[in-house]
Image (spheres, grey):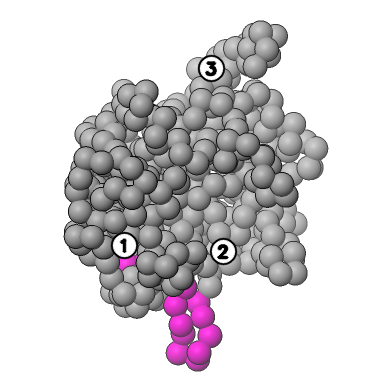
Amino acid sequence: MTRQKGVKASFLNLAVSLFLMMFGSGAFALDNSTVPETVPVDSGSFFMGQNMFGKPAGDISPFARTAGSASADAFTGATPFKEGPAHRVYVSAFEIGKYVVTNQQYAQFIDAGGYDNQTYWLIDAAYHEDATSGWDWKEEEGRTCPRFIADYSTFEESGWNLSDTPYYKNCRYSSQDNTPALGVSWHEAYAYCNWLSSVTGERYRLPTEAEWEYAARGPESLIFPWGNEYLTGEEMCGPPGSGAKANCYYELDNGTFHKETEPVGSYPEGISPFGAYDMAGNVAERTADWFQFGHYYSRIRQGDVINPTGPSEAVAPFGFPIFPFWMEPCRVIKSKGFNTDPMANGNYNSYGSSYPLRSAGKMFNVQYGGHYFIGFRVAKDID
């Protein structure tokens, strides 16, 4: 970033802070019943990431055995330079959303004029991005509510329509008040958190990758939110009330497959150690951090293991552009959604089935535009 851009960002960040202090009580009449509920996450440490094979060891090579694994020498399905090596990370106390943000909750942001107020969209310098990039994208695209490609074979679009009541009633995959808000880009999620801060007087934000994973795994570094055992696909995924742990791809009685969201909190069997729901399945989730392959290795070398926040600059996922894919910098996505097969057989390896619902698993996604299987939950600092 040039010195001129740095001064501009600092000025805009100061403006955001002043706005939040001056209007913390908010002119918008917020329905407190739809403020995202949070659960406390105690400070502590855990083994973040996962290696290809089970069983604890101190080796940090790509094929090292992973601390916290229940099955000795078991293939975990982890990708060495994406999710490995497993390494101990320290996280300060914070709060995280008990559930992902719902349609009803996000609609309040729209009703409050969230898409018309640039202040909510100004990006703090800590996120390593030009301060006005999100607002500029929204203006250029004419975005007024969440939109996404609902079918990548036909490029059919879906999302919200401000002429509908409620706006999301015809949203494919998620059309209920209490189902996850889909199609929300990183910048929209970021702006929502700033708006929520302004009307509640508390500082909401997106969780870092480390915070999200710690909230899902706990100090015991569980493989899944519910424990260390590698279950069958049927044990992991099924309808609410069936005893299944998560909402993901499963067969219905008529031979078709279930592929839509469920109301948040529908799977108490899959709750995380800190009391957060749906940290596996239902939707994949956005985090604050930039993504880069092999980043954990540089983190370990630099000793950056206390409240880590990912790469400090926006780079292509592989460190360089790979045409025609992954040309733009991406943010980290955690978990998997309702469209995920719980057992990814084959999955580009010769070792056997992988387990996409592992809490250490992650993806990357450009922050512009929405996707039909991605949502987000909030985090909040503890004073």
Region rendered in magenta = 244-258
Question: Which residue is labeled 2 in the image?
Answer: 174
Which quadrant would residue 147 be assigned to in this image?
A: bottom right
Q: Quadrant of the N terminus?
A: top right
Direction from residue 102 to residue 231 in the image, left or right: left
Q: Look at the image and tell me whether residue 244 can be seen.
A: no
Residue 75 is labelled as: 1
- Give residue 70's position: percent from left, percent from top: 19, 59
Q: Quadrant of the C terminus?
A: top left
- Give residue 24's position: percent from left, percent from top: 50, 24
Q: Earlier in the sequence, mark 1 or mark 3?
A: 3
Residue 17 is labelled as: 3
Q: Nearer the viewer, residue 99 or 229?
A: 229
Q: Look at the image and tell me whether residue 339 can be seen.
A: yes
Q: Amino acid at mark 1?
A: Phe
- Mark 1, secondary structure of its residue: loop
- Mark 2, secondary structure of its residue: loop
- Give residue 297's position: percent from left, percent from top: 39, 34
Contact between marks 1 and 2 (CB within 8 A): the answer is no
Distance from disc 1 to disc 2, alpha carbons, whole Å, reads 34 Å
Q: Main secondary structure of the magenta part?
A: loop
Is residue 172 part of the magenta span, yes or no?
no
- Mark 3, secondary structure of its residue: helix
